[in-house]
Amino acid sequence: MRRSICFGLAALAPFLLAMPVQAQVDVTGTWEITTVTQRGERTMTFTFQQEGTTFTGSTEFAPMGRGGGVAAGGPREIPISNGKVEGDKISFDLVMGMGERTMTQTFTGTVTGDTIEGTMTGGMQQTAPIPFTGKRKTG
């Protein structure tokens, strides 16, 4: 029995060694992420701080449409939650609202160097994922 296990492991070794090891990305920094919706194009600036396979951060949010912007008190900082990194994939949630009324937007994407592409789901009456692109700010 022991010999079978050893031979089995020896037979698998070349396959295991040939599997690519995907390096984990580091998302720490300031990112400009742009979505295009029915209400127009919106760019939000996110700041991320990564520690291992998790990250925290926030964005500044300026309400759109009627009552938005300066009339609504101007931009406000919103923390992200559930920030996760797996290889080159990231995901995080943005919970927005006032009082008991909240909505959660979930961002999932792939990071390549200083760029990110993915989709955002959730939000007000949103049924289809919304694509987003982003770029890390330098300097």
Image (cartoon, helix red, strand yellow):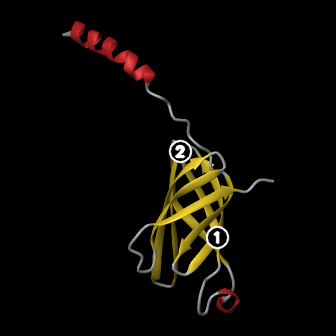
Q: Secondary structure at mark 1?
A: strand
Q: Is 87 placed above or below 90 here? A: above
Residue 114, position as x, y percentages in the image: 66, 49
Amino acid beneath label 2: Asp
Q: Judge the density around disc 2: few (<14), some (14-19), many (≥20) Cα neighbours within 10 Å.
A: some
Location of residue 137 in the rendering, given as x and y in whole percent from the top left corner:
73, 57
Left or right of 85, for residue 31: right
The residue carrying mark 1 is: 43
Q: Is residue 93 above or below residue 15?
A: below
What residue appears at the point 46 percent right and 75 percent down from the top-left corner? 123
> Where 21 sits versus 80, above or below?
above
Tell me the kind of residue under disc 1: Thr
Pick the front one: 137 or 133: 133
Farthest left residue?
1
Q: 107 or 84: which is nearer to us?
A: 107
Please tell me which residue is depicted at 55% across the width and 81% down the height of the picture: 39
Residue 67 at x, y percent in the picture: 61, 93
Q: Which mark is residue 26?
A: none
Q: Nearer the viewer, residue 81 or 63?
A: 63
Which residue is label 2 attached to?
88
| SS at circle 2 | loop
